[in-house]
Structures are given as structure tokens and as C-alpha cells.
Image (tube, rainbow, N blue to C red):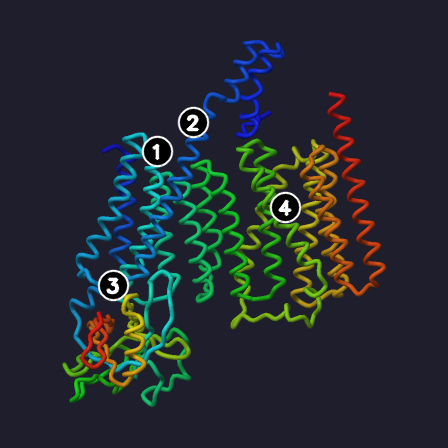
Amino acid sequence: MNQRTLIFVAAVVVQLAILAGIPAKKIYTRTTGQEVVLKVVPVDPYDILKGYYVTLGYEISRPSDLLDASKLETGAVIYAVVEKQDDGLWTPVAIEQTLPQDLPTNRAALRGTWNGLRFTYGIEEFSIPESKREVIADDLNKNLNEARVDVKVDANGNAALLRLKIQDRIYE
Amino acid sequence: MTPNKSTAFRATLKQELPAWLQEGLVSDDTAQRLAARYELNKLSQESSGLLAAVIFTIGGLLLGGGALSFVAANWEEIPTFAKVVLMILTLLAFHGVGYWLWHHKNWSRLGHALVFTGSLVFGANIGLMAQIFHVSGAWYGGFGAWALGTLVMAYAARSWITGLLALVNSVIWVLGISHDHHSFWISILPLLLAAVYLPLAWQLRSRLLYAATFAGFTIALCSLAEQQYSSAKFILMTLVISGFLAWATGEFHRVKNIRPEFGNLLAGLGIVTLGVIAYIWSFHEWWRVDSWLNRATAERPTLQWLLPTGITALIGLALIVMMLQEIQALPTRRLLAIGITLASGILVVCALLGAIHRGDQMLLTLAVNLAALIIAAVALAIGVMDERRAAFWTGTVFIVVLILSRFLEYETSLLLKSAAFMICGVTMIAAGIGFEEHLRHKEAQL
């Protein structure tokens, strides 16, 4: 292999490394994380690079009595502690400013960032297949109260979306 | 003197040479020497090669566009692992086949187009990966990743078009990140952009990429000024300084005879930028203190963008100093340098004074109009002195447009407007006739 070919191959390897790096964190979280179920609230934009996606909101997205968000600076990191309820849903019980340690198995901490209006956890964008866009949007509008997401949360609080569930319908 | 290697001239020469030979205007030996000097035997290869390059590039773009649309459609039925494998194989196929055709089969244009398409597929794959794993984040992050991978490929494959793609993605990324982040390191991004892409353009001898880098740099710098301070006057200032640098760099190439072909495009780009800016800003509305255009809307205004802007201005002035000897030797060069530097200086001072709400509004408006007139007058004078039609007509038309704009802008009677239009029209026609007569007279003497 001559030098020119070697350099070209190295460039291809760089591109592959970048591609691998994009979902790396999510793959790690999906592999090692604990599964939690969250209730959702949606919004609907279009992104040319990712195709269609729905922006999802959660109970843990909004500022609440658990923490006075007015004192937070934009970009501030928080950890929303959620606890599993009898109905299988995980609901917020506390918001901490450092990663909680030694949580019981029925609790998980999601790492979030305050953007000035709401907390975001890296699980707000759910990609929609074009063929199912109308179906999912319609389903969400009609059955908002019954929309749930399955999420994996790793030991550092990073979260990864697995699937969207509306009643008995599952979208991945 | 560099021979005129434009395709149009060479095609005409190739067409005329047999007739000259037949009529005894040139000898066999002269004809052969002319044919060799202008590489007339390569003309048909080049035109068919160029056509092939265009076709292959369009084909590559269509393929890449198809890949991107494929992302938007979202590919649901195939399992995740298979999707990822297929994406990677597609990328490897385009790059692999492209490289093989380019360097091992002498199908250089097709191979190059496929390698370029590979970088488009890389962009599609970024979107697909984010989609499959529901990766969320700032919208510009994807463009940043695309830019990085494409830039590396542009250097490795020595591909100017891949470099252009990387540049576009880089500029989009800078626009996005400068909106969300205002740290010091963001302020040096435009300079980093130039530092990364200018060497690539130089290495590849690509005038288009070279000029596009200056354009990208200008956009990035203006975006910084807009995001960090949002004063229209400061954006004006960055535009003027960038235009001045583009002109100064172009002049430097021409004057020092360092790749003068780079200089023509760049100097033209710089002068056009300055002319357009001066014209737009010649309207009084920009300079009224209470004008809506004066609102500074940045949340937390900062002056960090002044650093790259200042460095740009210093580089431009340094280039002028380095060319002083050559500039002083030629009257037209001297006139151009003085005129452009003076006009740019007036525009920058007006922008600064206007931004801090100092100086009479009318005076600032007049000063900007003066700067615009200087640019027009310089173009006109060079056209007459060097007998260049393009410069003459650019200067003439610009002066007329400036005068008529002022008449239309201010409240004047219809009669006065009519007189102004007619005078301008008659003057333009008379000047044009005079100039053309002068040129014809000169050609007849030769």
C-alpha cells in the first residue's frame, strides 16, 4: 500500500470513527443502564438532517416545587430523581444539583440541563418514520395522557430513548 | 506576461490559425509555436473532460441528494444492526470504488465524483445514526461532525469539491455555535476557518475554494459580530474589513506575481463587496440615531469579536505595506490602492462613530456616499487609464446608480427627478461613446 492510499484509508477511518462516536454514549447507556418509564408531552418540528422527529416533554422537564429554577443559570446541570410507582410509571421525587449516590433500585437519577425555560435530558427528540408520521402525530394528539417512553439511565445519569408507547402500540 | 489561457481565446485561435497559415500571415514554425504555447491540441480533451466532470458531479450530487432524502424518509423495516452495517458498507463502497477508479483505472473524473459522493453519504449517515439511536442535541452539531470528516477527506483525497462541501458545513456550524456560545474560543473560529481551508485551496490550486474561503470567513465574522453585539454598524464594519482584506490579498497575488490567477477573482470579490456595502449603506435610514436598524439586540453584548476583526484589518494593512514598492511604480495600481484604502477607512470610521452614536447623522451619510463615489471613481479612472471596458462601465454605472438613488431617496419634485434621469442618461451615453471612440482610435493606430 503506497503513502497516498494509506492517507486515504486513514481519512475513511476518521469518518468511520466520527460515525461511531455519534451514538457511542447512547449505546453505552442502552447496554448498561436501568430501564425507567416516563409519561410524555409532545411538540412537533422538522429537522432536515435527521428527518422527522417529535420533541417530547416530561414531568421532569418543567420547573416545579422540587427546585426553584429562577436561581439557576442557563446551562446549569441538575439530576432529576424519579421513583417507580405502583402503575409502573416513574415520577419525579427530587431534583439535586449533584449526582445522587447509592439510590435504591426503585429510584433513578437523570442528568439534565436547564436551558432557561425547561430541563432537557437528551431524550427529547424521538425520530419518526415518514410512513408513520401522520399516524404517530394523530395518535399522540388523541391519546396524549396515555403516551409513555421507555428510557435507559446509566450510572452517570445519562439517558437514552428506547421506544414510545401509546396504549398498546409501540414505536421504536 | 502570462499567456491568455482562457478556453474562449484558445478555441478562437484554433479556429483562425489554419486560415492565417493559408493566407501566409504566419509561417509554419510560428503556427506550431502558437499551438504549443496555447496547448491547442488539448482543447477537445479539456472540453469533453469538463463536460464529463460536470455530468459526473451532477450525478454525484443526485446520488448524494437521494441518500439524504433516504434519511428523511427513515428506513424502518430493517433491524438496527443491519441498517448500521448497510450504511457503513455504502460509505466504504463509494470511497473504495471511487478511489480505485481515480488512481488505478484512470477514470479520474468519475472516481473523484464518487469520492465526493462518499462524503455526501457520510453526511447522510450522520443523520441516520442520530435517527436510529434517537440522539438529540444542537442542530449544528451534525454539520460540525460532517465538516470534520469531510475536511479530513478533502486533504487526504486532494479534492477541491470535497473541500468546498467541508467549508459550507463548517460555516453553518460556526453560525450555529456562535448563536449559542459566546466564549473567547468561539471568537477565533473565523480565523481558524481561514487557517484550515486556505492551505487546502493553495495546495489544490483551487481559485474557487480560495475565494469561497474568504466568503466563508466573512460570513463567520459577521455572524460573530451579529451574535455577540447585534449592532448593524458593527456588522458593516466587519463586512468592510473583510472586503478590504479580500481585495488586498487579491492585489498582493497580482502585484507579487504569486499565483496571479488567484488574485483576479479575489480582488474582484473584494471590490464588489466594498461597492455593494457602500451603496447599501449610502441610504440615510441606516444613520438615523432613532432608526430601527440601530437596535443592539444581543442578550449579553460582548466585544470579543473585535479581536478577529482587528487581526483581519491588520493583515490587510500589512499586505498593503508589503506591496508599497510595486504599488508606487504603477499609476493605476497606486490610484486603486489609495482609493480602496481610503474608501474602506471612511466606511470603518463611519461605522464606529455610528455605533457609539457620535457624529452628525447627515455627515455620516455624506461620508459613506463619498466612500461609494471614491470606489466608483477609481473604477472609472482605471477603466480610462488602462483602457478596460469592464472597469469603465462598472464605475460609470455605479456613479449613475448612486446619483439616481439619492434623487429617489429624497423628496424632490418630479421635474427635478426627470431632469436628473435625463442628464444621467445623456452623460452615460456620451461617456460610453467617447470611451469606445478612444479605444477604436487606439486599435486603429496599432
Q: Are marks 4 and 3 in contact (CB under 8 Å)?
A: no
Q: Amino acid at mark 2?
A: Gln
**Cα distance in 3D space between marks 3 and 1:** 35 Å
Label 4 marks a residue whose chain is B
> Badge 1: few (under 14), some or many (20 or more) residues near its Cα, within 10 Å?
some
Q: Where residue B111 appears, x then y in whole percent?
A: 32, 37
**Cα distance in 3D space between marks 4 and 3:** 48 Å
Q: Are marks 2 and 3 in contact (CB under 8 Å)?
A: no
Identified at 33% across, 63% down, the residue is: A51
- Residue B271's label in the rendered image is 4
Is circle 4 on the same chain as circle 3? Answer: yes
Q: Which numbered disc, 4 or 3, marks the residue that appears first in the sequence?
A: 3
Mark 2 lies on a secondary structure that is: helix
**Cα distance in 3D space between marks 4 and 1:** 36 Å
Return the residue nearer the eye: B48 or A28. B48
Is circle 3 on the same chain as circle 1? Answer: yes
Which residue is label 3 attached to? B132
Q: Are marks 3 and 1 in contact (CB under 8 Å)?
A: no
Q: State which mark lies toward you, 2 or 3.
A: 2
> Badge 2: few (under 14), some or many (20 or more) residues near its Cα, within 10 Å?
few
Image position of A68 (left or right of B205): left
Return the residue nearer the eye: A48 or B256. A48
Which residue is label 2 attached to? B45
Identified at 44% across, 66% down, the residue is: B181
Return the residue nearer the eye: B12 or B439. B12
**Cα distance in 3D space between marks 2 and 3:** 46 Å
- Residue B108's label in the rendered image is 1
Q: State which mark lies toward you, 4 or 3.
A: 3
Mark 1 lies on a secondary structure that is: helix
Q: Up-down: is B382 above or below A58?
A: above
